[in-house]
Amino acid sequence: MTFRKKGILVLLSALMLTICSLVTGINALAEDYPTQSVTMYIPFAAGGSMDSSSRVLAAGAEKVLGQPFVMINKTGGGGTVALGVLAGEKPDGYILSAGTSTGIFRIPVQRKVPYKPLADFTHIFAYAAVSSGVVVKPDAPWKTWQEFVDYARQNPAKVKYSTAGAGSPMHVAMEVAGAKEGIKWIHVPYKGSMPSLTAVMGGHVEACSSGPKFVSMVQQGQLRVLAVHTKERMVEFPDIPTFMELGYNYLNDTFFSVHGPAGMDPAVVKKLEDAFAKSVDTAEFKDMAKKFALQPLQIGSAEYTKILEDGWPKQVKIFVDLGRVKEAATQPR
């Protein structure tokens, strides 16, 4: 064997040893994960259902993983600010963000965001489904959804409804219903659920298409619910119809979830999936979910990623059909 060939063999052997060493090191890092605290962004303000649920979820995961979760509120843009920051972080599992499916496949369809929703993240786990519905004052003249629709049709451009923000699932629900019923009503967006609900209680709008905050207020007699956007009737209101039952072919498919930067080690993702699943199964999480009318879920990374990818073209079609966009404002990849 020539000296040159021997030299090549030595180099190849050294290269193989280096690769094996790197792979072993990476596997060891994944096996030891986490060795330090994990930071999780919260994309909405303190006190709401997202803030509270993500904190309880993280507290349960801490007990499984043996490391603290540091929770940081990064609000704005309907949840897109936190995701925009997350997209630029290292994919080592130590920077995560809570989020909603709205931040992945609803807002980016309507306006440009600083990330590619189906390319820039590892979608780790979906842990809750959100309840929402349409409410009016308890002394309003409409006792059913149909009575409200009939009134709105007979009084074009006079009925106002509030939501927690333009482009939200609650806004889209009313636009879908209005288009099908041939109704022209006026959308009044607010900066959050509570202001939008306060508006209807104060008589500034006739109705509110609200997130889960409405549940306790209806139970306390402060509001009356006419319809809900959930897949099935809510256990809290078994006599109230869903939008699907009413023939609108629309449901609020928003999930609360946890995301990481793209490129995370599958072994680290699996550890996080398992920890979050155990947290969802705790009494603390179930009590919190009941308080905020959330439906606990355990949807792992592969399944949740497919849900988001399948949901993207459906959301594009919804907004195109409503005339809100001609095409998606953000490229998904």
Image (cartoon, helix red, strand yellow):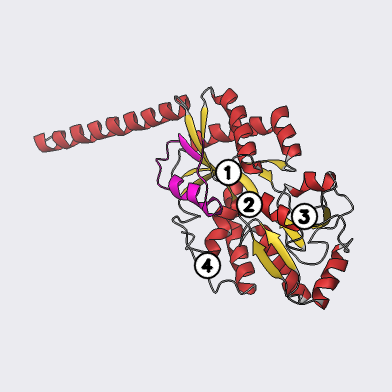
Circle 4 SS class: loop
Q: Secondary structure at mark 2?
A: loop
The residue singled out by tag 1 in the image is: 45
Q: Amino acid at mark 2?
A: Gly
Q: Amino acid at mark 1?
A: Ala
Q: Is residue 229 visible in this depiction of the protein?
A: no
Numbered mark located on residue 158 in the image: none
Name the residue beneath numbered marker 3: 201
**Rendered-image quadrant of the N terminus:** top left
Residue 181 drawn above or below residue 302: below
The mark nearer the N terminus, 2 or 4, is 2
- Point out residue 56 in the picture as x, y percentages from the top left corner: 63, 32
Look at mark 2 in the image and give the residue it sits on. 192
Marks 4/1: CA–CA distance: 27 Å
Asked if residue 298 lies left or right of residue 109, the reply is right
Q: Indicate the quadrant where residue 30 lies.
A: top left
Measure the C-alpha gap from mark 4 to mark 3: 36 Å
**Which residue is situated farthest in the left direction here?**
3
Query: Is 73 part of what is drawn in magenta?
Result: yes
Q: Is residue 224 left or right of residue 28?
A: right
What residue sits 55% from the left and 34% below the top? 272
Give the percent coordinates (x, y) of residue 308.
59, 54
- How crowded is the residue under tag 1: few (<14 C-alpha within 10 Å), some, or many (20+)? some
Q: Nearer the viewer, residue 120 or 178?
A: 178
Q: Is tag 4's residue or tag 3's residue first in the polypeptide sequence?
A: 3
Q: Measure the C-alpha gap from mark 3 to mark 1.
A: 22 Å
Q: Residue at x 60, y 52 (%)?
A: 101
* Mark 3 surroundings: few (<14), some (14-19) or many (≥20) residues within 10 A: some
Image: 26 above or below 218: above
Give coordinates of residue 183: x percent, y percent. 76, 75
Q: What residue range appears in magenta?
A: 72-96
Q: Earlier in the sequence, mark 4 or mark 1?
A: 1
